[in-house]
Image: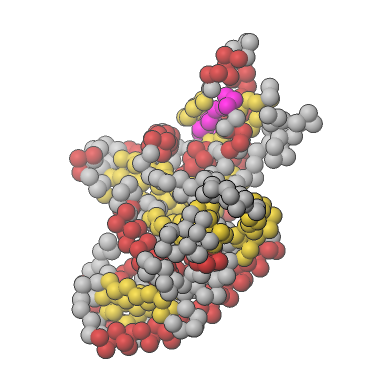
Amino acid sequence: MVGLSIGETNFIRGGIAQDLRCDGRKRLSYRPINVETGVIPQAELGRPSSSRPDHGKVSIHVDCSATAAPMYQGKGGEELSSELALALQRGLLGSKSGAGAGIDLSSLCIVEGKTCWDLYIDCLVLSSDGNLLDALGAGIKAALSDTGVPRVQVMAADASSSSDQPEIDVSDEEFLQFDTSAVPVIITLTKVGRHYIVDATAEEESQMSSAISISVNRQGHICGLTKRGGAGLDPSIIHDMISVAKHVSEQFLNKLDSEIAAAQARQEES
Amino acid sequence: MEFVSPEGLRLDGRRPLEMRQLRAEIGSISKADGSAVFEMGNTKVIAAVYGPREVENKSQQISDKALVRCEYTMANFSTGDRVRKPKGDRRSTEISMVIRQTMESCILLEKFPQSQIDIFVQVLQADGGTRSACINAATLALADAGIPMRDLVTSCSAGYLNSTPLLDLNYVEDSAGGPDVTVGLLPKMDKVTLLQPDVALPEIMQMDSKLPIDIFENVMQLAIEGCKAVAIYIREILLENTKQLEYRRGK
């Protein structure tokens, strides 16, 4: 995707080995984050799955716009989008049975076994310069913190009524703010040569041998793990990468939270 | 349904000849050669231009001028109900073609033979007039990319409801079923490059006087005035952008 000459590749590799990257960052520092709240995930009323009757449903969808790169037009971006969506789901939603989900699904339940909120999270990639997963994870966290779930009143249903859908009155005025303190953030560690870097640009990503994306939450617990890239990794290295990710995640979470709070304050002012 | 109240106010409080608020931003996507975000009221679109560059598909290469490709997509969260299939549906294909033809008429294609120019437009929020917003955004993005053009292309829509010509329809007014027209204009040359009327037949049949040609001309003239107003705003934005670039260059 990115055409690099041999001189440039050597430059990138050599720099990383010496803890100095192309744009002057250290190996473990992030690019500046900019958060703007405005896009709201949509929630619809739906039925919970039979295996988890007291939880709501969340589905994540990623779309790579052609504005990010010409090759994403038409069907081009589909492979990347589905890969990203799957990785996000694994990181944020846990396994199929819903156990260990980063997002608290039980808050989305309305009537146990009958009705719940169906939350759709739609992500759109407009411009890409590497490290999409981290950016998407941070974006989802910011969007969720801005989401309001309308307050719902369940009308008393007749005990004898056999209708599946109890009557629900959805309030237009009152909103319950979604709780995002437990939502994890995704950190991607890219291994180039013998060192790992965080927040790789597209050029650096083209040089990677493998990458691990770890979703960590505020307590330092790991909510999900995805490995990409062909090269094999020694288990001790993976251990090491996980501890590095935990360490980096604290700073990243603090930065992200302060940016989200600043963005919300800006929104309230305007 | 009342679209124009007896006091002369529309559903969103505007007067019939009033446009929505315009907002534009150049250079949002650093990777693209040119990019722009354009907002008309609640309708928000982003356009990115890649080119001129080598043609991907050699068989489509044109020997004496550039090939223009355009793709129009709507984000699935852009409208009230979630659109399931953002790309490839018929409306998107049609609008892509319309935008391409409009931009082709104003770009100096002969300057770049055997190359291609890609214009990608993404609708982030749709509230009527997406076609116009896309064309305006594409013009700004092409200017940002430094691609030579004969003139700016600006676009605006106008319609006719409750016996009043209305400028710049939003979604509710657009889907009301009255006749409306989207016009694309080359403002300096005063030439119309795009004229897309959307005349709902039942409306004509019901009106006992068919759709008088002078009402249509009225509405079209109104849209042309709207285009000129957009052109003034776009020119301001481009001047401001050039001043910023000059300032950063240190002159």
Residue nearer the viewer, A54 or B145 = A54
Measured as percent of width and height from the top left, residue B4 is found at: 72, 30
At x 50%, y 38%, the residue is B131
Measured as percent of width and height from the top left, residue A11 is found at: 27, 78
- Please say whether residue B186 is one of the residues in the magenta stretch: yes
Residue B44 lies left or right of residue A153; in this view the side is left
Compared to residue B173, the image places residue A255 above or below, namely below
Compared to residue A180, the image places residue B209 above or below, namely above
**Res. A130 image quadrant:** bottom left
At x 63%, y 10%, the residue is B208
Residue B141 lies left or right of residue A69; in this view the side is right
- Please say whether residue A9 is one of the residues in the magenta stretch: no
Measured as percent of width and height from the top left, residue A254 is found at: 54, 80
Compared to residue B181, the image places residue A251 above or below, namely below
Quarter of the rendering occupied by the N terminus of chain A:
bottom left
Residue nearer the viewer, A55 or B138 = A55
Quarter of the rendering occupied by the C terminus of chain A:
bottom right
Compared to residue B74, the image places residue A143 above or below, namely below
* Magenta extent: B177-191
Does any portion of residue A34 appear in the rendered image? no
